[in-house]
Image (cartoon, helix red, strand yellow):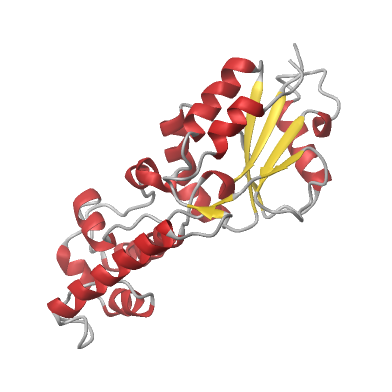
């Protein structure tokens, strides 16, 4: 069988700003622990779904089309995720499977998380693919690595891409209630309310702080947060373009040339 083309994507290349979804993840973890301890839900939430957020801008524009382009133009493409910014637990909690479903693709496992040696990475890839490609000798010669970082363990075969720092706002509490059917009273918890407060997230709750008990204050807080994100998206620097200006994968589809 012909040798594979191995495409390794740093997760930060293909998604925008993840601060809000990581806060959702933290909140779900608090609720999960209370679910196990206090039996506050009929079913604990183990995986979260950010499909809507990805489809509304968090997934970098045209990444789906780029994957289709690769699968059409090159035989035997193999895809991997690499990151040193996120925990394996966070990555395994739903975001990768959501991306796979949207893009009709599959990332090979193991996910290359917090690995700082090219030899370890290539050995993992080799072990993963050798049964499929018995003649595979050196994965280093077959891979191309997409990264936003100029300094990293991959010195060759890498494409340094512009940062995609698009932010997508959504009301976490409303999402948890509507998507995961978490009851309103779950948010009466002191630990949850403290987390919302410390992380600048709006929430109206009579059991919270004096500010959280003021509905008008929380509405204003949300409006300010929404406007701040709009300003950030509209005024990113040249390396941090928002969704309406990012054409990286469109351009790459026109210019990428690998041996067929």
Decide which of 138, 243 is in the foreground and name it.
243
Q: Residue at x 27, y 68 (%)?
A: 38
Tell me the quarter of the picture where residue 73 sits.
top right
**Residue 187 placed where, x, y %?**
22, 70
**Residue lying furthest right in this view?**
137
Q: Residue at x 36, y 42 (%)?
A: 51
150 sits to left or right of 107: right
Q: Residue at x 42, y 57 (%)?
A: 233
**Residue 107 appears in the figure:** no
165 sits to left or right of 84: left
Tell me: residue 72, above or below residue 209: above
In which quadrant will I find the N terminus? top right
Tell me the quarter of the picture where residue 7 sits.
top right
223 sits to left or right of 91: left
Decide which of 108, 148 is in the foreground and name it.
148
Q: Residue at x 65, y 23 (%)?
A: 77
**Residue 122 placed where, x, y %?**
79, 38
Decide which of 17, 137 is in the foreground and name it.
17
Decide which of 234, 145 is in the foreground and name it.
234
**Residue 2 appears in the figure:** yes
**Residue 161 placed where, x, y %?**
64, 45
**Residue 236 placed where, x, y %?**
49, 59
217 sits to left or right of 126: left
């Amino acid at each position: 069988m012909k040798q594979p083309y191995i495409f390794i994507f740093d997760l930060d290349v293909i998604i925008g700003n993840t601060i809000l979804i990581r806060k959702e993840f933290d909140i779900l973890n608090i609720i999960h622990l209370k679910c196990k301890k206090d039996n506050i839900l009929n079913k604990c939430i183990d995986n979260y779904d950010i499909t809507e957020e990805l489809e509304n801008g968090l997934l970098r524009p045209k990444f789906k089309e780029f994957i289709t382009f690769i699968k059409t133009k090159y035989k035997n493409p193999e895809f991997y995720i690499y990151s040193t910014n996120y925990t394996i637990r966070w990555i395994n909690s739903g975001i990768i499977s959501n991306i796979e479903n949207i893009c009709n693709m599959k990332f090979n496992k193991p996910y290359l998380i917090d690995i700082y040696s090219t030899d370890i990475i290539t050995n993992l890839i080799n072990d993963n693919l050798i049964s499929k490609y018995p003649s595979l000798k050196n994965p280093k010669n077959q891979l191309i690595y997409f990264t936003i970082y100029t300094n990293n363990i991959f010195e060759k075969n890498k494409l340094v891409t512009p940062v995609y720092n698009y932010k997508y706002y959504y009301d976490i509490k409303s999402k948890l209630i509507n998507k995961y059917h978490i009851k309103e009273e779950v948010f009466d918890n002191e630990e949850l309310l403290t987390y919302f407060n410390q992380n600048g997230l709006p929430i109206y709750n009579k059991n919270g702080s004096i500010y959280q008990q003021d509905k008008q204050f929380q509405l204003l807080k949300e409006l300010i947060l929404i406007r701040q994100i709009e300003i950030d998206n509209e005024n990113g620097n040249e390396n941090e373009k928002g969704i309406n200006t990012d054409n990286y994968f469109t351009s790459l589809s026109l210019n990428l040339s690998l041996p067929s």
